[in-house]
């Protein structure tokens, strides 16, 4: 259930920061790797 919360937070942050898509991609990759760890 924590993963669902984190994903919702990621989605909200991505929607808030559509201006910097490059940074969003980098962040999503970092978060994805963190979740895998």
Image (spheres, rainbow, N blue to C red):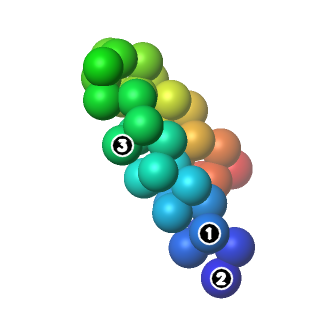
Q: Is residue 29 visible?
A: no
Judge depth for marks 2 and 1 and give the one in front.
1
**What residue does disc 3 label?**
15
Q: Is residue 2 above or below residue 26?
A: below
User: Of marks 1 and 3, which one's residue comes earlier in the chain?
Assistant: 1
- Between residue 24 and residue 15, name the one nearer to us: 15
Q: Which mark is residue 5?
A: 1
Q: Which mark is residue 1?
A: 2
- SS class, disc 3: helix
> Residue at image x 49%, y 41%?
13
Asked if residue 24 lies left or right of residue 34, the reply is: left
> Residue at image x 62%, y 69%?
5
* Image x and y of residue 4, in percent: 56, 73
- Between residue 12 and residue 4, name the one nearer to us: 12
Q: Is residue 37 above or below residue 6?
A: above
Give the Cα separation between the discs numbered 1 and 3: 15 Å
- SS class, disc 1: helix
Figure quadrant of the N terminus: bottom right
Residue 24 in which image quadrant: top left
User: Of marks 3 and 2, which one's residue comes earlier in the chain?
Assistant: 2
């Amino acid at each position: 259930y924590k993963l669902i919360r984190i994903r919702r937070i990621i989605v909200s942050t991505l929607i808030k920061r559509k201006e910097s898509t490059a940074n969003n991609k980098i962040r999503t990759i970092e978060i994805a790797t963190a979740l895998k760890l």
